[in-house]
Amino acid sequence: MSEPTSTISDRIHEKLDDLTRAERQLADSILENYPASGLGPLAALATEAEVSVPTVARMVQKLGFKGYPEFQAELREELKAAARGPVAKHDAWAEGAPSGHMLNRFTDAVIDNIRNTLGQIDPALFDEACEMVAAPKGRLYIVGGRITHTLAEYLFLHMQMIRPEVVHIQSTSNAWPHYLLDVKEGDVFVIFDMRRYENNTLKLAEIAHQKGAKLILFTDQWRSPVHRLANISFSSRIVVPSAWDSISATLLLTEAMVSTVQNLCWGDTKDRAEELEEMFDNTRLFRKFT
Amino acid sequence: MSEPTSTISDRIHEKLDDLTRAERQLADSILENYPASGLGPLAALATEAEVSVPTVARMVQKLGFKGYPEFQAELREELKAAARGPVAKHDAWAEGAPSGHMLNRFTDAVIDNIRNTLGQIDPALFDEACEMVAAPKGRLYIVGGRITHTLAEYLFLHMQMIRPEVVHIQSTSNAWPHYLLDVKEGDVFVIFDMRRYENNTLKLAEIAHQKGAKLILFTDQWRSPVHRLANISFSSRIVVPSAWDSISATLLLTEAMVSTVQNLCWGDTKDRAEELEEMFDNTRLFRKFT
DNA sequence: CGTGTTGTGAGAAAAACTTTACAGAATTTG
DNA sequence: CAAATTCTGTAAAGTTTTTCTCACAACACG
């Protein structure tokens, strides 16, 4: 038996550019949970990929198989061969990379960070924070430092679409004191401060706190000094095999917050609903996950 | 949907005592290379196990299935779940949160995205891209769009510390054409373009390509039109239970790239070594993972 | 010898695959 | 902006494969 030099997965990737829209959609679906979906009946695969039956038949031939059964047979062979191999499942995230490859080591670390970070989150506090952010009573200020202002801006860009009165402050900018002039009680600050913690951020937090604003802090596992002032803090694990830190876990929290807040605000802000609706139409993104 | 408490493999083992000789022979064959052999046609399985067709049919019913197709369907389901891996099986990441809590749903989705994204990366291409980015021959341009410029800036901030001649362009800015004036052959562009893909980014990529620059693209699973011009593309999964997309998987790739490039450049740029060293001292971050 | 098991062969029924034709949609081209 | 081209889904029909079942003979074993 001649060991096939390339798996079907490879073959699909190679041909990816020659495929049409629907075929690519199908290819994605096959790769989605590979190889399980390719082992069912053709019609089921078509349904799952949301393409028509002939599209599947056409593509299978395009990939060089005489028919769907032949395609399946090779998938099974592949599966057999794979099972023979190392049982170590997630030894490698990126197929074909040595397990010591940076991609694998890095991914291991990030997943671990995420697990660890989530394990230490109090869901009730998270919900509370989201409610504070969603509440349209006061202004929402979003603050980031030298590196973390990218996170801050990411949050800002989304909040801006969800609710009014959102301000993005970069604590390293020398303009930040001006922003604080009209902070009043009931305003909410979301502050990102990861090591190395920035003095400006701390000062800014102090003033905001003093003026009666609520503070929500995203920091790392060693916690920025701001946490003593903050009403709610979330610490993320950030260690990766790199000379720098990872903000992946914090990004996850931020994205989860965006999603939660948007659910909370749903329907409230009529004027934004329009804009959102248009976006949903354009991106075909509005899927109910309940 | 009730999660089956037992796999088919378990089920066979349980019933093993109630089985007759030929049936046991069949069972052994199924478990031999599980689950591949069970996914082919019934007749093939019979031949492989050296039993008759009716024996297979009879045993499948004995196991409690209505017919062979039903048996196969469950095998496929099992395979699907197994591929998801032990990591994603966690049904509560944040302890104490109901498994339907946004934090858990979101984390599931992100982990799944990461797994899927990494599974489709060619490590050789990734290394190649990192070498291109590390090569100090030409300039390094980093380009992002409306949302993705946060990723671009994150990469920029780190590259700036690693190598000289790094430029950050925001394709939504109307100043970008000026940046392209002195692009020359050998320059490298790192472009972020996720849906909804931006026309400006495409135009910018076209000009850069035409001027002989190399393009590295970070996009989503549906791939920005820029990918046709790009020398190397990486597509990430971005779907999460939210009205918006997630850039978490792409951030992971970006961070992994930063780490890899920094390893490649290590020692080359003497003038930056100082600055780095000081940083490492301050952050106690310098850990050798090699 | 009797009981329970297994294989053979065949045929009916069901399911699956392949192909074709065509119309509507999407995209490209001029 | 219209025409041309390409792509895609629907429907249907024909073909092949697969599954299921039955009857019966052969076999194993106490």
Image (tube, coloured by chain):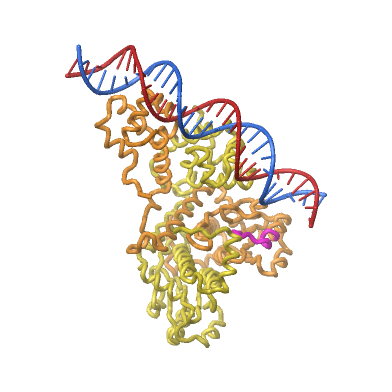
Chain colours: A yellow, B orange, C blue, D red
- Provide residue B7's location: percent of width, then percent of height: 34, 42
Residue A282 seen in render: yes
- Provide residue B286's location: percent of width, then percent of height: 44, 63
Q: Tell me where residue A170 sits by quadrant.
A: bottom right
> Is C11 located above or below residue B151 in the figure?
above
Query: Which residues make up the magenta segment?
Result: B193-203
Camera-side residue of A102 and B66 = B66
Please give left or right for residue B212 compared with residue A73 in the image: right
Q: How many marks?
A: 0
Camera-side residue of A116 and B62 = B62
Q: Is residue B200 magenta?
A: yes
- Provide residue B48's location: percent of width, then percent of height: 40, 26
Camera-side residue of A141 and A194 = A141
Q: Is residue A159 magenta?
A: no
> Is B21 located above or below residue B195 in the figure?
above
Q: Residue at x 40, y 37 (%)?
A: B70
Q: Tell me where residue A132 sits by quadrant.
A: bottom left
Image quarter (top left, top right, bottom left or bottom right) of the C terminus of chain A: bottom left
Camera-side residue of B25 and B175 = B25
Q: Residue at x 52, y 39 (%)?
A: A43
Q: Residue at x 51, y 58 (%)?
A: A287
Q: Residue at x 53, y 65 (%)?
A: B273
Please give left or right for residue D8 compared with residue B113 in the image: right
> Is B158 located above or below residue A51 in the figure?
below
Residue B277 seen in render: no
- Provide residue A118's location: percent of width, then percent of height: 38, 63
